[in-house]
Image (cartoon, helix red, strand yellow):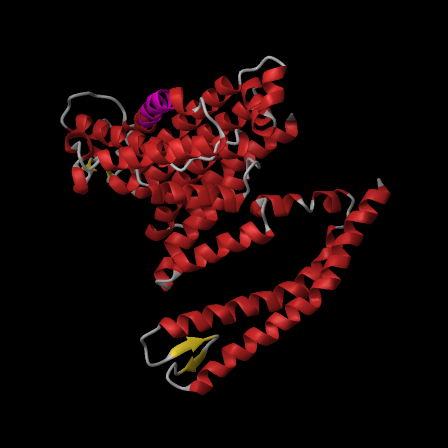
Amino acid sequence: MLKKLSIWVVFLAILLILPLLFDSIMGISILNQMAIAIVIALSYNMLLGQGGMLSFGHAVYFGLGGFMAVHALVMIEFETVTFSVTLIPMVGGLFGLVAAIFIGSFSTRKAGTVFAMISLGMGELIAASSLIFVDFFGGEAGVIGDRTFGPPFFGVDFAQDVEVYYLAAFWVFIATLFMYLFTQTPAGRMANAVRDNPERAEFIGYSARRVRFISFCAAGLFAGIAGGLFAMNFEFLTEENLNAATSGRVLLMAYIGGLGYFVGPIIGAVVLTLMNSLLSNYTELWMLYLGIMFVLTVMFLPRGFAGFIMLHQLAWHHGRLKTLALPYLVTGVPALLCAASLIGLIEMSHTEADIFHFLGLPLNPDQLVSWALPVLLTLGAGYATRSSLPQLRDAWHAANTEGKRAK
């Protein structure tokens, strides 16, 4: 119990310290985006990772919650209602819950591929409706609000991004805590059982449909909270927040981070936010690299980054983890060099500049000799990586086998 409590204290401390480490406009903006991404990715993990429900329309609850939240900001601005903007994420969460109750009432009657197709259809239906019902969705222009018109919260008017971050950090901590506690409840445990074997769950007296419905509604609630945080941070929402592209990004976050592991979506949210915010500033092909990373994750890390980390649990428990450091280094360095060389070749084939800088060296894409260096590095580093794999495999086997013997 004390160990779990210390983990949550450390998590809260990290949330509070981060703005001090990244004290810049861009840094705070990225942290705000990470906060939003963490909540929606964790809510999606409640569906797919915990409940086994593959959804292609999870952005619906994020978007609907966000639209209701930004309308609440507008009502506060025109003094139609009066309450603190600190409650705006809860407004989004409640609207996301209402939407999840309605859609889940019929979609959770099915599972597997049928459920996935229903979620895709509902996602496309609501995304198309956002361009039709302009009074609520604002059409192509969307809806704009202003978070500074609400009554100050202990003198804070949330005009600065850092003030919004601390509000987001509070909601991230609360949402993350309650999503974790949900996994420890009978409903959360039975969601895992229904995911793994719905027939057996029915046999012992549980309704698989009711368990899916409870998980579905909980996921809609927290996705709506993420939408409310989005409305507070960006102060506007458009059709893009409802469409399949947003749902796809949420799926990527959860899968790359590690489905089934509670910390997995957090890792995926951080990675994809950094790629979207930082890598996109340096290259127009960042979506290509994201797609490549997803394919490689599916092929070689089917349990995501969190699953890869958890594979080291046995070696760490028996004190054998340090024996993997050198093999990882011997394999990892040429692998990174190979990846950098491939990226250099891709970027050089796409650039329109006369000079392309590769590893600090100026290269001319119009000269054949300039292609020789990255090509040779790619081939050499790839060969070195492949040659070192047997040693890495033996070290991995020795670390885990001796750990079992020590037990």
| Residue at the limit of the structure toward the top, as seen here | 205
Residue 210 is situated, as x and y percent measured from the top left of the image, at 49, 17
Name the residue: 56% across, 20% down: 185
Name the residue: 39% across, 27% down: 220
Residue 403 is situated, as x and y percent measured from the top left of the image, at 81, 45
The quadrant of the image that shows the C terminus is top right
Residue 222 is situated, as x and y percent measured from the top left of the image, at 41, 29
| Residue at the limit of the structure toward the front, as seen here | 114
Residue 34 is at least partly visible in this image = no
Q: Quadrant of residue 392?
A: bottom right
Residue 183 is at least partly visible in this image = yes
- Left or right, 350 with reference to 143: right
Dominant SS in magenta = helix
Residue 332: in magenta span: no
Q: Nearer the viewer, residue 114 or 310?
A: 114
How many labels sit on residues?
0
Q: Which residues are magenta?
A: 92-103
Q: Nearer the viewer, residue 168 or 309?
A: 309
Name the residue: 49% across, 69% down: 342
- Left or right, 211 with reference to 220: right
Q: Quadrant of residue 307?
A: top right
Q: Nearer the viewer, residue 378 or 264?
A: 378
The quadrant of the image that shows the N terminus is top right
Name the residue: 61% across, 26% down: 197
Residue 386 is situated, as x and y percent measured from the top left of the image, at 66, 67
Q: Work out whether 128 lies above or below 284.
A: above
